[in-house]
Image (cartoon, coloured by chain):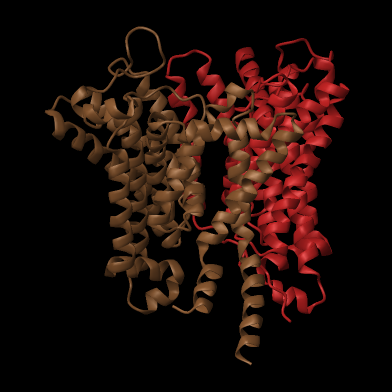
Amino acid sequence: MNIWIKDLGLLINAMLIATPPLLYAALGSCFSERCGVINIGIEGMMTIGAFTGAVTAYFTGNGWLGFVCGGFAGAAFALLHAAACISFGADQTISGTAINFLAPGLAIFLCKAMFGNSSDSPALDVSSKLPKMLTGVFEPGSFGYNALSTYYAAWLAFLLAGVVWFVFFKTRFGMWLRAAGEHPQACETLGINVFRVRYLCVVFSGFLAGLGGAYVTLATVSQFRPSVIVGQGFIAIAAVIFGKFNPQGALKACLLFGFCNGVKSLIGANNAVSPNLISMIPYVVTILTLVLFVGRSRVPAANGKPYVKAR
Amino acid sequence: MSPIRNKRGILYSNALYTFLAIIVGFCAGAFLLAAAGISPAAAYGKLFNGIFGNAKYMTWCVVYASPLIFTGLSVAFSFRTGVFNIGAEGQFVVGSLAACTIGVLVDAPAPLHALLCIAAAAAAGAVCSAAVALMKVKRGINEVLSFIMFNWLAFYLSNYVVNLPAMRRTGGGEATKDIAESAVILAPQSVIRITGCPAANYGIVMAAAAALIIWFIINRTTLGFRLRAVGCNPYAAKYGGINADRAVMTAMSVSGALAGLGGAVQTLGMSWRLSQFAGQEGFGFQGITVALIGASDPVGCIFAGLFYGAMKYGGTKLSLVKAPAEVVDIIMGTIIIFIAVSHVFRNFFTSKFAKEKGRECE
């Protein structure tokens, strides 16, 4: 009995490590995709967020400041993406691909320039990472310690999922942004500034992706390394498609991923099966779930199409 | 051709804007290098010396380029047929895995063995991509999503196979045994001696041949016409009697086979074994760049691949002048974003040109 509770605690702990960065990025991706701009650049924005977060926290010793700065770094690259796609009508996939070269390239370049040609930033001490809640209440290794004494920012991500759902479906701005992704011309005839809505959404998507990246370096890994993000941005995009472009769907998909990650680390603990095979679990589960239960997801109608204002 | 038409031809052509984009890319890189306190002249000097310095370097650039031309072709082919093959990465990995497995475990005489490896790689890539196509056609699952999943499945599968007792090399190193000599596609000894590059191989010949074949298929066959029609407008194509589902299946299988071939060229030509991956190698994602710089044109992909291969190889020399090799990524990213917005400049110049022409006519 006891061992079950302990395992459950470890499972929740592993979920809480894997889910939040994906969730931040996936919520960001929701904003962008729903307003009609494909954002493949989430990956790059996460990487620059991870770097900026780690470096800011290293120099200021303030984890929260690093977290927010990571978000702003992501937003800066999102602004570039927005300018290219919205103002200049560039192909959104191409621009996103460019961001995925520019942002990680710049992150590693700056890291090498700042820290004597090392592509890893110095390790952060506990005080300059993001703070944990309920520290010292539970004894290390107990269920409560594993399941409840986690980072505030982890729970913030789940809270944010609710907020984003509210914004999407219960506010006027949410209706505007969904309309901009479905039929921008109709939007414009109602006096809504499609350009402004899309700019706001894309920049905010970069901000959230940056937060996701910063969460990785400030909570999980505690330093920036080139391999720190690799692939998570794409998985966040996959989670959004999986979740049918809804924040609540994306939350479910991210939880599924986090859960598989938890199972992975539980099974992996006794080394009976090759770790490489165990690592496949999240991807196999995703594909099976898609094929068996989820099926077709409808892409927002105007997604990927540059909007040209009528004369 | 009159000078006016000639001028318009230049202003409309992709080549001019690609060239401008490359210049802008280098300027951005120089700016960043200068900001980091590194002399751009020294860094670019080293980069160009590392590319054009001697026959050996130039051959290495070509060796680096061959697999990129293949992944570039793979992505370009998918673009032309309306699919986005973000899974070239995974297909490349299963291709190199298949080639390596056959190369290590099977025993066959020289030319046959290499051909067997190449066929296996193409088949592996095609199967991988066709599975995604099947899910798209039958269950309507967005291909971008399943490609991303398959990239990671291929990644872990490769690492799993590398560590199997039958494949793993004895003695240190997280890698497989070397492939049999009969499976290697190295160029004749004389070429290797003259160029001084120990990895000079037939990859570039295969890549160029593949590019020409793909060009022919796309532009000169009914199959290519059907695929392009579906790429432009699947509903219109369906109305015209084209089986859109089958076209998507065919297009994605071919695209996957091309990426798989890239893996074979890399394994049989240059690395001769498969190492355990720490992170994704990026050949597939670099293929996206090659396709974009090559304007999704098969022949353009050859040049774009050579350019990227040269930058990648030259970039490895940058550490000698203490410049981060990532400046190459930044240059590439800037080039792509400039190409993405180049139509704005094109419209600007061509509309200006139209005015000039109007004046001439008066």
Residue lying at 66% horizontally and 65% vertically, measured from the top left: A89
- Give the residue at the far left of this rendering: B109
The reply, left or right, for residue A27 in relation to residue A270 is right
Dividing the picture into quadrants, the one containing residue B333 is: top right
Q: Work out whether residue B146 or residue B122 is closer to the camera in this orientation and state it.
A: B122
State whether residue A298 appears in this view.
yes
Residue A151 sits in quarter: top right
- Seen in the picture, residue B25 relative to B299 is either above or below; the reply is above
Q: Which colour is chain B painted?
A: brown
The percent position of residue A294, horizontal first and vertical second, equals 52, 52
Identify whether B210 is placed above or below B166.
Answer: below
Q: Looking at the figure, which quarter contains the C terminus of chain B?
A: bottom right
Residue at the far top in the pictured view: B171
Residue at image x 28%, y 32%?
B99
Quadrant where the N terminus of chain B sits is bottom left
Q: Relative to B78, is A310 on the left or the right? A: right
Q: Is residue B212 left or right of residue B4?
A: left
Q: Position of residue B2 (x, y in %)?
A: 47, 79
The residue drawn where x is 63% and y is 77% is: B353
Q: How many marks?
A: 0
Q: Horizontal placement of B38 versus B207: left or right?
A: right
| Viewer-nearest residue: A260 or A54 | A54
Please state which of residues B228 and B328 is positioned toward the viewer in this rendering.
B328
Residue B67, image x and y in percent? Answer: 38, 39
Residue B139 makes an appearance in the image: no
Which residue corresponds to the image point at 44% horizontal and 51% vertical from the top-left?
Answer: B75
Q: Residue B46's x, y, as percent?
A: 56, 30
Front-most of residues B260 and B247: B260
Q: The chain drawn red is chain what?
A: A
